[in-house]
């Protein structure tokens, strides 16, 4: 007899599949979760704004600058700023670079593919010759090592790509916070829906990269390449930063000797959804940098919530990391919903089956993530 | 001046116990803390007026009391008792500061602490054998109650065991004192080493054996030690601090004051055996510490091992070794008190001391990072890492004992090497690794828990960098003891051949 109903899933994380199919998020809906997620995304939005400005500044103004001493100053170099920098009273822009390098290393999407094309290589060559036209030393080096400067330019393209991606995300998170303050966001599904709508709205936004040298504009990623926000930056970002991540410098050798690093890059699981919030010197992008930045911009209601815990603000960065992880499961939910082959609320059996297979595929990747831990 | 150190705490104990029950525990604690600080300041004042060159008792006080039985109120201070007096005053402040502000039956608790203080201070100052015995006995009861009332689950067992052992120790010591007066024909119990040294060797050996047994229980030396791990495990943290920091020192103080000083011939005769006993004790204590699962037991067995170094130095009987013995007493007092304080904080926050259960407490965000760091420092100090007081004391012990008893000293040095083994094993298990559930939600460590430990750390470091502030008090006293010894009797062959008193000292 032909079944008219979807069979129960045999996946170990079936509970989350049902959760998604019923319109819920990977993070259970509760007033505290809403407060936590919106609060942390507010501070994340502020920090992403700063990261995005800096990444775009580096891409636009520090392009092919071999020793970019003042790349974190956004063009405003002064002694007072220098003192602030040394005193470490600043945003940890290094975190943004870690993420950029993570994306660059893992690749994926149209951006990665384009940067390996002859078209890019040709545009890079023109820029390099223009940039160093009065610098025979660099041109000589370029002749000797023809791959070095193009590789730098690829990295600059990623600076720009991530900068543009975070620009959208920052605005999206800040508007989420505004809507929450206005009483429009009340549940976790509201949060997810806000993010999903933001992602969908920006999905086809073009990703372009131009470098200005004097009065000449070099189009490194022209609009004609057709790179777009969702497919060419958002999805590779989620893959590289949420899932795969990177064993950060210093631990690679040790972990490799202990056979703790997967042989294949696609098997990496050091991303934000897997990261251990307790700083133990393990692998992954050091989350403490981001947490340290976010602690300055926590809204009062979230700070008060943290104050009610046993250690109050003693372990603030860990709490921020735990909350951040919860929020990232919401963002992932939005991505899952947005990329689903059919609306998850579909009543057509075939579409439900296709969605089920799609969701089980996602869940395969969550088996070792911290999805269980964020449920409380 | 000295009487103030005895009567003031007694007065304090009486006043505190007369507080109405409406007075909060915090108030009682504050009053006690102020009184303890006054006593500490008074001890420092005494130290500032102490004549380092004098070889006789200073600040002596003598009041006739019960002449008919030879008991007089006779007090005095010398280079042997002053460092211990200071250690006691300091640890008293630390113990009160480390006490839970909301401790139940607070008036009784703090009154007992001060009565304990009376007993300890009186014993260190007494210049009459019977007076010493009275003070020695006085400290047993408050300690019994402190363990039996505020102790852990098996507190009754531990307190009773402590009582039986230390009461037995008291009985033996009293018998020795009576025997000394009997054999010397003295008319009083006045402390007079000159008389007892005239006794024949056999009598001295008999009496010294009693001293070794009595004070050996108190110190404790193996196999008389079994009360100590139980007492430590069941005692609350402040009581463990006092027990390890000060009360054990009564045993080694007694050995020096009433064993070595009063029975020089017998001491010289038994010295090689005592050194061997020390070596066995050091190794046994270290091996037991390695095998323990309870952090407090590790520290307790470490105490047994480290107190054996005092016996080794005392057995060597050179000027440097006697200074080293006093230094080791102070050093061990500070370090073991710190270790017990830190273990106490770990227990308070996690609810366990089991090294098989605890993990990752050094976690900077959710663990006990400062406490863990101080524990590492304390372990380093205990293992004799240079720059801390443990190194100074242990180096002097081994340097001064090696020419006299090379084999025993080498074995003790292995024991100190094992200190690093058992403490690193404990630290590795408890503080390193990942902080697992349920310990990732530990409550905050507040400054009340940190400050007492930081104070002790300051002393451990300062005395490690400026050891003269530790050893100068006992230089004259040990020199005098040695002079007396060389005048009295030819020491054993081993000693005459190798003793080079004061070679390392100006």
Image: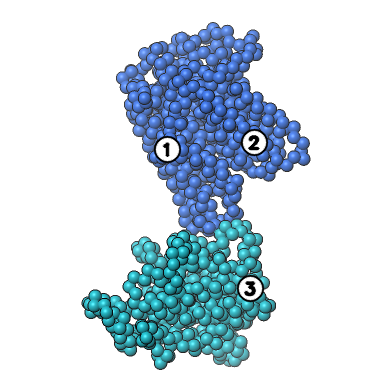
Chain colours: A cyan, B blue
Left or right position of B494 against B213: left
Q: Residue at x 48, y 49 (%)?
A: B373
User: Along the line of sight, which residue is nearer the eye, A235 or A257?
Assistant: A235
Q: Which residue is mark 2?
A: B34
**Which quadrant holds the N terminus of chain B?**
top right
**Mark toward the start of the polypeptide (1 vs 2):** 2
Q: x%, y% of residue B405?
A: 35, 26
Q: Position of residue B362 (x, y in %)?
A: 49, 53
Q: Residue at x 39, y 63 (%)?
A: A251
Q: Which residue is mark 3?
A: A34
Whether discs 2 and 3 lie on one chain: the answer is no
Q: CA distance from mark 2 to mark 3?
A: 51 Å
Q: Position of residue A135 (x, y in %)?
A: 26, 77
| Residue density around tag 2, few if under 14, some if 14–19, many if 20 or more, within 10 Å | some
Residue at (41%, 71%) from the top-left corner?
A71
B89 vs B503, left or right, is right
Q: Residues within 10 Å of mark 1 (few under 14, many from 20)?
A: some
Who's the residue at 62% across and 64% down the image?
A303
Q: Which of labels 2 and 3 is toward the front?
A: 2
Q: Are marks 1 and 2 in contact (CB under 8 Å)?
A: no
Residue ID for mark 1: B465
User: Of helix, strand and loop, which one carries label 2?
Assistant: helix
Query: Secondary structure beneath disc 1?
Result: helix
Question: Which of these two is toward me, B253 or B216?
Answer: B253
Q: Position of residue B189 (x, y in %)?
A: 57, 13
Q: CA distance from mark 3 to mark 1?
A: 56 Å
Chain where mark 1 sits: B
Q: Residues within 10 Å of mark 3 (few under 14, many from 20)?
A: many
């Amino acid at each position: 007899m032909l079944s008219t109903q979807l069979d129960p899933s045999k996946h170990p994380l079936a509970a989350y599949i049902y959760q998604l199919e019923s319109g819920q998020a990977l993070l259970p809906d509760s007033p505290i979760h809403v407060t936590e997620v919106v609060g942390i995304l507010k501070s994340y939005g502020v920090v992403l704004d700063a990261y995005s400005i800096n990444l775009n500044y580096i891409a636009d103004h520090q392009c092919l600058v071999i020793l970019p001493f003042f790349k974190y100053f956004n063009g405003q170099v002064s002694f007072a700023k220098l003192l602030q920098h040394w005193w470490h009273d600043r945003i940890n822009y290094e975190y943004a670079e870690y993420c950029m390098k993570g994306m660059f290393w893992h690749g994926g999407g149209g951006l990665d593919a384009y940067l390996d094309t002859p078209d890019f290589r040709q545009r890079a060559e023109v820029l390099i010759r223009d940039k160093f036209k009065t610098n025979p030393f660099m041109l000589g080096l370029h002749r000797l090592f023809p791959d070095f400067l193009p590789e730098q330019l690829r990295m600059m393209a990623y600076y720009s790509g991530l900068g543009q991606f975070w620009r959208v995300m920052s605005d999206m998170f800040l508007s989420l916070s505004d809507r929450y303050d206005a009483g429009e966001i009340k549940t976790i599904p509201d949060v997810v829906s806000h993010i999903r709508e933001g992602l969908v709205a920006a999905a086809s936004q073009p990703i372009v990269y131009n470098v200005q040298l004097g009065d000449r504009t070099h189009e490194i990623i022209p609009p004609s390449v057709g790179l777009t926000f969702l497919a060419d930056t958002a999805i590779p970002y989620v893959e590289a930063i949420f899932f795969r991540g990177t064993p950060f410098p210093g631990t690679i050798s040790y972990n490799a000797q202990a056979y703790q690093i997967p042989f294949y890059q696609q098997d990496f699981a050091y991303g934000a959804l897997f990261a251990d919030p307790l700083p133990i010197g393990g692998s992954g992008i050091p989350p403490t940098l981001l947490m340290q930045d976010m602690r300055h911009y926590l809204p009062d209601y979230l700070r008060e919530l943290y104050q009610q815990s046993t250690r109050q603000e003693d372990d603030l960065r860990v709490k921020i990391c735990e909350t951040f992880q919860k929020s990232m499961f919401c963002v992932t939910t939005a991505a899952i919903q947005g990329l689903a082959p059919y609306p998850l609320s579909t009543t057509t059996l075939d579409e439900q089956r296709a969605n089920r297979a799609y969701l089980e595929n996602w869940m395969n990747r969550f088996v070792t993530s911290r999805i269980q831990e964020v449920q409380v | 001046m000295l009487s103030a150190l005895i009567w003031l705490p007694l007065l304090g104990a009486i006043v505190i116990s007369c507080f109405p029950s409406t007075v909060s525990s915090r108030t009682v604690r504050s009053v006690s803390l102020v009184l303890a600080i006054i006593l500490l300041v008074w001890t420092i004042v005494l130290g500032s007026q102490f004549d380092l060159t004098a070889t006789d008792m200073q600040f002596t006080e003598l009041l006739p009391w019960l002449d008919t039985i030879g008991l007089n109120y006779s007090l005095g201070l010398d280079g042997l008792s002053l460092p211990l007096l200071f250690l006691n005053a300091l640890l008293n402040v630390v113990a009160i500061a480390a006490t839970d502000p909301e401790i139940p039956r607070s008036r009784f608790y703090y009154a007992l602490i001060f009565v304990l203080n009376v007993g300890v201070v009186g014993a260190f100052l007494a210049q009459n054998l019977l007076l010493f015995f009275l003070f020695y006995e006085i400290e047993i009861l408050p300690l019994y109650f402190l363990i039996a009332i505020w102790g852990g689950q098996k507190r009754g067992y531990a307190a009773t065991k402590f009582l039986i052992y230390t009461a037995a120790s008291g009985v033996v010591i009293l018998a020795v004192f009576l025997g000394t007066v009997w054999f010397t024909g003295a008319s009083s119990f006045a402390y007079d080493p000159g008389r007892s040294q005239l006794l024949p060797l056999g009598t001295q050996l008999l009496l010294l054996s009693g001293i070794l047994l009595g004070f050996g229980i108190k110190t404790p030396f193996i196999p008389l030690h079994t009360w100590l791990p139980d007492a430590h495990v069941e005692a609350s943290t402040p009581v463990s601090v006092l027990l390890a920091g000060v009360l054990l020192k009564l045993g080694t103080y007694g050995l020096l004051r009433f064993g070595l000083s009063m029975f020089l011939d017998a001491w010289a005769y038994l010295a090689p055996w005592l050194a061997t006993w020390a070596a066995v004790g050091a190794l046994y204590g270290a091996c037991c510490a390695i095998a323990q699962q309870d952090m407090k037991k590790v520290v307790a067995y470490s105490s047994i091992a480290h107190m054996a170094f005092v016996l080794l130095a005392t057995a060597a009987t050179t000027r440097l070794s006697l200074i080293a013995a006093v230094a080791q007493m102070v050093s061990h007092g500070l370090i073991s008190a710190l270790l017990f304080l830190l273990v106490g904080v770990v227990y308070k926050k996690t609810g366990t001391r089991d090294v098989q259960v605890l993990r990752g407490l050094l976690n900077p965000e959710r663990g006990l990072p400062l406490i863990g760091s101080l524990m590492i420092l304390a372990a380093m100090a205990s293992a004799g890492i240079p720059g801390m007081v443990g190194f100074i004391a242990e180096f002097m012990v081994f340097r001064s004992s090696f020419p006299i008893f090379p084999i025993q000293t080498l074995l003790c040095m292995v024991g100190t090497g094992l200190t690093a083994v058992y403490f690193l094993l404990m630290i590795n298990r408890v503080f390193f690794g990942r902080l697992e559930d349920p310990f990732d939600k530990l409550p905050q460590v507040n400054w009340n828990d940190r400050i007492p430990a930081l104070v002790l750390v300051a002393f451990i470091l300062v005395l490690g960098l400026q050891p003269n502030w530790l050893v100068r008090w006992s230089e004259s006293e040990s020199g005098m003891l040695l002079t007396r010894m060389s005048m009295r009797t030819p020491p054993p062959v081993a000693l005459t051949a190798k003793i080079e008193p004061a070679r390392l000292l100006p």
